[in-house]
Amino acid sequence: MIDATETRAIATICYMAALADGTKDDPETEKLNDIFDELGGVGESSIQHRVLLNQTSLENEAALIQGAENREYTYRMAIRVCEADGDQSDEEREFLFQLRNALELNSDGKPMNPDDAQSTKETETKADEETPATEEEVEDLLPIPVNIEAEGKDPGVVAIEKLILNASILNAALELLPQTLATMAILPLQTRLVYRISKANGHELDFGHAKEFLAVLGVGVTSQVVEDFLRKIVGVLIKKTKGRAAGTIAQMATGSATAFVSTYAIGKVAQQYYSSGRTMTTDTLKFKFGESANAAKGMYEEYKPIIAENMASLDLGKIMKIVTGKA
């Protein structure tokens, strides 16, 4: 049952969805009208006034929707609006990401319910199937893991800081290897880093959420490939790839720095985001990512000798087994 307050909140969120890409075109307006009619009629002019004058926010409206079914319904309606004019734009995907967080939904649009034992069991089972890299796995993959100063710090925070730093060194070392395939492991390892940090902060999210988190930060596939494709080619390419035909030492060094900086920034922003209860806006996430990336640039020079040492002893086959879920 949707009460009057929730009805107005749902309508407001749908109106925000129509504006997510900066314009409200005819298909979106038509879909909005259909939804407003479905909700039993709402005051569109007053909703428009409140949204355009920034008298409310997505988080405030989402907080008014209490029932799990109503939160799921709200998300479905927002998708209908965003897809009214075709495929979702980047701005619309970011809006839906924020909406899921505000409504406490998983990436499949289903409500998170930590008190539901069965739901928790299914989440943990899925996590096991995805074989996310634990801190120990990261250090096991790194021949020379790095420790950090722990005195006076919370042990949980120290563990995450170690995880972030060692994951950054691992990915930077991978980029120095003369195998094109090494680059393919970086994005999956970054995804697993986000998953581990979210779980360490008490968020039992599915693996798809971690991928969407990276997409919001602007971290895409580019020259890398994802797990399903890797599973098909890993056995062949490890045997056949002898070197980067078009690569140069300079390009490899640049790639190593990029891998270190991006991985470190991803980890730091993920820690801030999940430790704060997933309350940051998309703009804040991107700003924090830029801040962390700038800080990591100087750190790369400091850890460059350790990265080079690790590169010499990396077991690429073992890394690929973890990346492809065959470990």
Image (cartoon, rainbow, N blue to C red):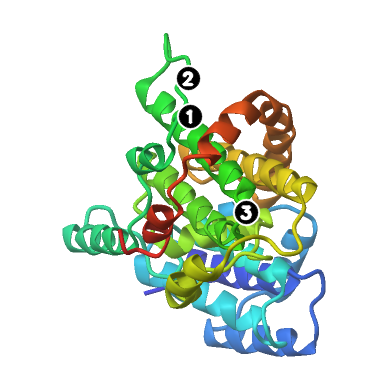
Which is nearer the eye, 207 or 24? 207
In the picture of the structure, the residue carrying the numbered disc 3 is 178
Above or below, comparing residue 235 to residue 94 in the picture: below
Q: Do we see residue 88 in this rendering? A: yes
Above or below, comparing residue 144 to residue 186 in the picture: above
In the picture of the structure, the residue carrying the numbered disc 1 is 161
Name the kind of residue labelled 3 in the image.
Pro
Where is residue 131 drawn, in percent x and y? 33, 57
Tell me the CA gap for discs 2 and 3.
Answer: 29 Å
Q: In this view, does 9 lie to the left or right of 45?
A: left
Q: In which quarter of the image is the N terminus?
A: bottom left
Which is nearer the eye, 307 or 207? 307
Name the kind of residue labelled 2 in the image.
Ile
Where is residue 308 drawn, in percent x and y? 60, 34
Question: What residue appears at the point 70 percent right and 88 percent down from the top-left corner?
Answer: 86
In the picture of the structure, the residue carrying the numbered disc 2 is 148
Where is residue 307 drawn, in percent x and y? 58, 34
User: Within 10 Å of the Cα at label 1, are there few (<14), some (14-19), or many (20+) other Cα atoms?
Assistant: many
Farthest left residue?
Answer: 117
Q: In this view, does 297 lie to the left or right of 280?
A: right
SS under mark 2: loop
Question: What residue appears at the point 42 percent right and 9 percent down from the top-left corner?
Answer: 152
Q: In this view, does 242 lie to the left or right of 67?
A: right
Question: What residue appears at the point 37 percent right and 72 percent down from the top-left corner?
Answer: 69
User: Within 10 Å of the Cα at label 2, are there few (<14), some (14-19), or many (20+) other Cα atoms?
Assistant: few
Whether residues under marks 1 and 3 lie with C-beta atoms below 8 angstroms apart, the answer is no
